Amino acid sequence: MKNDNKPSERNGERPKVIFDGVSKHFQKGKESLHVLDDINLEVRDGEFVCLLGPSGCGKSTLLNIAGGFEQQDAGRVTIDGEEVDGPSSKRVFVFQEYGIFPWASVWDNVALGLRDVPKEEREETVQRTINMVGLAGFERAYPMELSGGMKQRVEVARALAVSPDVIYMDEPFGALDSLTRLTMRSEIIRIWQQEQKTILFVTHDVDESIQLADRIVVLSARPGRIAEIVEVDLPHPRDLGSPEYGVIKNRLYALLGVEHTI
Amino acid sequence: MILPILWILGSAAVFIFADRFPERVRDQLLPISVAVILCALWSIAVTLSGTATFPSPTDTWVGMVELIESNRIWGDIVASLHRVSWGFCLATLVGIPLGLVVGWNTRTFTALNPIIQGLRPISPIAWIPIAILWFGIGDGAGIFLIFLSSFFPITVGTMAAVRNISLVHQRSAMNFGLHGMQLFRRVVLPAALPQIITSLRIALGVAWLVIVAAEMVGMDSGLGYLINDARNAGSRYDLVVATMLVIGVIGIILDLLIRQLERFDEVRWGYARR
Ligand SMILES: Nc1ncnc2c1ncn2[C@@H]1O[C@H](COP(=O)(O)OP(=O)(O)O)[C@@H](O)[C@H]1O
Ligand SMILES: [Mg+2]
């Protein structure tokens, strides 16, 4: 690798996900919308990385490229050295809106990616994952009978059940009320620590990024460029009132170009 | 004259004091009182106009009893239902698979959608001469017309349902590696099913409208024919109106029956936010 400042090398771990010069524009009629500009980023195995930026800066687009749902104009994304060229259950999404199937029970939703697994192992995995996200007892329930937070738990369970290499989360808690959102954040940290998954988490919420991430990738407004990568070197569970927290918060607000005090 | 006015006053009282009744009773009582008011107004209008041809509610009731006791109406009900059920079932068997394929496959959609949209606005009634030319006077023409009138709502509804499958659900399916029959069975069909059922409901309603018209013009049995026959055979408007009421009641029953499909766990989500 060319740059010895890359976090992967500094920690002596192999990089899991590599974004190498990724650019993207959308054609809207005659107008060309430049969304992402030369994104270079390395994500370590087991790392929790937040992509933080204003709405419309291209966060979802970047994640969709990494998931194989969108095609970049230039550059490439590799996972474990393998180039991403389409969707795969090795890298799964927890979607912004509810991506679970309303026509299937909690159990069937979680079992979605396990069709080729032998029955016994499948049932064991589904039950274990449902228990892990705290939905034991709701296996036969349908999504419409669940609260927003519970639906999002189903979605997380569905992703975890296939033991993916990477989990992409696109503002997964955006539609939840603020208390449920806090609970879901600590739940996701608990699960992440337990399962040691690599997580790429998109948010436009400064607090959310500091509460969750090992590193926060701050994107500038469109065209999205990496403005700065901010390390959050605080142990979990994080003290939201600590001076370090405040320092990082001020730094992020400054990077996003907004004043913290109103 | 006095009796209908009393009925109206009584129903108005139910309306005014509706809050005093328990909710379940009230939900039954309110529509009944409106029906009573309408019948009373009808009765008053008949009396005031002094008409000898148009039946009063009582005449209609007597006509209804006559139809039922003469056994004549049962044969006509069966004839109409026979045509509707065959035409509707055939349209379902053809329309749903066709709609699923055309909705899912972009090339087929591009090729067939303009044709389907072009044929759809042609009223099934306009097909009656052709139906009779091809099938003669009888069940064949009726079934064909019902097939046509159900086929378009079902096909177009199924097509739209498939094309409306949300991007998140499509992407979820791709993300977890669903393709081919699995994609179809686990995502396309269940996602479209609520809207397909709605289109079946619409189609059955249209079919019931069309069969009456078709039987009036081009058939020699059925409820539509009965209406025509009652008028032609001595202006029996009491039988005409009685038959109309029977048609209405059967329409309600058909709708109630088909709505049972909406109650399955797999489709209930599709009607939740209405
Ligand atoms: N498929 C698309 N076609 C055209 N423009 C798009 C498409 N997807 C996203 N965009 C545009 O690209 C920009 C970035 O979108 P997005 O990645 O969703 O931003 P974010 O997730 O950061 O809010 C927005 O201005 C959006 O309107
Ligand atoms: Mg977004």
Image: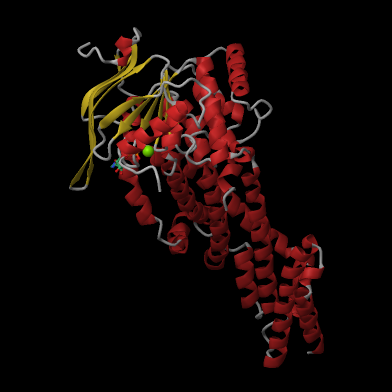
| Residue depicted at 60% across the width and 37% down the height | B266
User: Quadrant location of ligand 2?
Assistant: top left
Give how far across and how far down residue B183 sits, in percent. Answer: 46, 29
Q: Is residue A202 visible?
A: no
Is residue B267 shown above or below A3? below
The one of A90 and B110 positioned closer to us in this rendering = A90
Q: Say whether residue B267 is left or right of residue A50.
A: right
The one of A106 and B7 positioned closer to us in this rendering = A106
The one of A117 and B69 positioned closer to us in this rendering = A117
Tally of numbered discs: 0
| Residue depicted at 56% across the width and 60% down the height | B211
| Residue depicted at 68% across the width and 87% down the height | B45
Q: Which quarter of the rendering shows the N terminus of chain B?
A: bottom right
Q: Residue furthest left?
A: A30
Q: Quadrant of residue B77?
A: bottom right
Q: Residue furthest front?
A: A243
Q: Say whether residue A76 is left or right of residue B198.
A: left
Q: Residue furthest top?
A: A12
Q: Quadrant of residue B123?
A: bottom left
Q: How is the image coloured?
A: secondary structure
Give how far across and how far down residue A204 sits, in percent. Answer: 39, 38
Q: Say whether residue A139 is left or right of residue A227.
A: right
Q: Quadrant of residue A118?
A: top right
